Amino acid sequence: MPSGPTDPAGGWRDRFEHRAQWAYAFRDLAVALASPPLIDPTMVTLRRALSGQPQDIHAPSTLNALAAAATRHEVEVIAAELVPALASRLADATLERRRADAILELATQSLAPLAAIAPVALLKGSASAVQVYPHTAWRHRKDLDLLVGDNLPIVREALLARGWTDAVTPRRHSEGPAAVRAWPMVRSLGPYGVSLDLHRRIHATAWCHVDSAAVLAAAATLTRHTSLPITSPVDTLLTTVVHLVGSGFHEPLKGWLDVARLVPLLSPAALVARSNQFGLTTATWLCLTVVRRWFAVDTTAHEAGLAPSALRSRLLKHLAAGDHDTPERRPLYKGLSQRIWQSLLTDRPATARQIS
């Protein structure tokens, strides 16, 4: 017998809702194209402060707004360090972040034996925290991210033997550690709980093609910080770009600050080559244009080998001209942003650049 949906009406309903979502997306894109970019003066001031530009701020209302924005975007510790006038307003949050950071660092050290079992590497914020900040507490982290690739089942078994437990949903558990993108685990360290995500793959959808094995092969150990390997600076930047785009740019400012601080560590040629390899040429280019505008970082040399066609460049920069909580010209809700940006930033065959 031919196979088909058991509920024809449900199938039609799903198709209608899918088309309706894209109709709303095109409508909202059209509104954004025709509207002036949204600018939030508080976010402009906060970004300038985080980029090291002197800020002479005394008005209590302004300081309160900056403290609220720093907390919302998870940059409390670094904001308090760079803008002393904010220190008292962020004191409680800063103390909590430093305490959490100490626990995460203790947990990180306990993972060191894994490097002898299988290729692993600290990923995302766990990597940038030690690569671009003078103290890991400057980089707000809620958990640890460890790239393990296809060795996820082996690493999981090793962690189970060391006091970690699974923290997965029933659906993910039924799929098993050899099939999922990531596998969450938890462990208690005294009165504190620590979360750890084991990543088999970097991204959830197929808009790009980051090679986990290649990222693991390029990882290196920074002995002054941890005995665990860490993704290379270029791979840390690119995996951060994947995370930013995957969220539809609805991520806290801390991720954008990571990109801004990583750029000076990278050669343009290395960034272009790796972006091409992972299908992230257009996405990386657009993220660089945002951090250049937001943080006054000179990214022109890195952008040169990544830019798409002139027409596409103008369209993308026009849509990403916002200066508020996200770079969107006009804010869209997260689900819609995820669909739109992943579609717009998927590399076309003609986008790839060759390194001569």
Image (cartoon, rainbow, N blue to C red):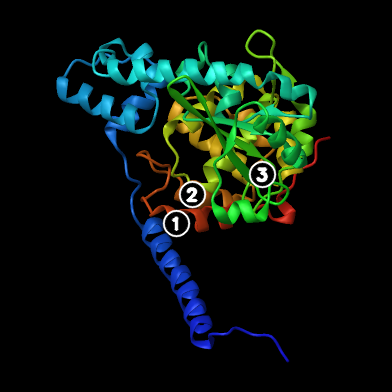
Amino acid of disc 2: Gly
Out of 21 and 31, give the one closest to the viewer: 21
Q: The disc labelled 3 sits on which kind of residue?
A: Leu
The C terminus lies in quadrant: top right
Determine whether label 1 and label 2 are within 8 Å by CB: yes
Alpha-carbon distance for marks 3 and 2?
Answer: 15 Å
Instruction: Give how far apart the Cα atoms at labels 1 and 2 are.
Output: 7 Å
Q: Residue at position x 54%, y 38% from top?
A: 287
Where does residue 175 sit, x and y in percent of width and height?
66, 55
Which part of the image, by quadrant, shows the N terminus?
A: bottom right
Residue neighbourhood size for the residue with mark 3, other residues' Cα within 10 Å, grouped as few (<14), some (14–19), many (≥20): many
Which residue lies under the disc numbered 2?
248
Q: Disc 1, disc 3: CB below 8 Å?
A: no
SS under mark 1: helix
Q: Residue at x 69, y 19 (%)?
A: 112
Between the residue at mark 1 and the residue at mark 3, the CA separation in whole angstroms equals 21 Å
Residue topped by disc 3: 280
Q: Secondary structure at mark 2?
A: loop
330 relative position to 198: left or right: left
333 relative position to 266: left or right: left
Name the residue tied to disc 1: 335
Q: Earlier in the sequence, mark 1 or mark 2?
A: 2
